[in-house]
Amino acid sequence: MAIKAHMETLNVRHQELEAAITTETKHPGFDELKVVELKRQKLKIKDELETLRAKMKPH
């Protein structure tokens, strides 16, 4: 169950990052470096989620 709870936490963080990216890019002259960093964090979380999903699949 700890893995599922961790995955849920990661999903929430992934959604928060998506919202932050959307909010940031709505402003004219937004900080591209900030958006790149947010996207990098989001991708890292996505990769971790995929790894956890693969571990949960029965072989």
Image: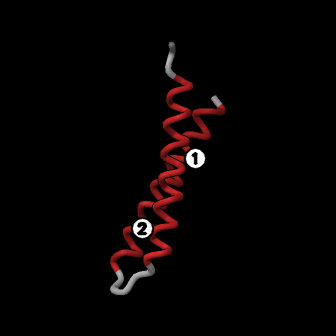
Quarter where residue 51 is shown: top right
Quarter where residue 29 is shown: bottom left
CB within 8 Å, label 2 to label 1? no
Q: Nearer the viewer, residue 9 or 35?
A: 35
- Residue under the point 55% across and 33% down: 52
For residue 1, side relative to residue 11 (left or right): right
Question: Is 41 situated above or below 30?
Answer: above
Mark 2 to mark 1: distance in Å? 18 Å
Task: Characterize the local packing of mark 1: few (<14), some (14-19) or many (20 or more) Cα atoms within 10 angstroms.
Answer: few
**Amino acid type, mark 1:** Thr
- Residue under the point 57% across and 47% down: 9
Q: Position of residue 6 (x, y in %)?
A: 61, 40
Q: Residue furthest top?
A: 59
- Residue under the point 40% across and 82% down: 30
> Of the numbered discs in the image, which one, if any, rests on residue 9?
1
- Residue under the point 52% across and 40% down: 49
Q: Which residue is mark 2?
A: 21
Q: Quadrant of the N terminus?
A: top right
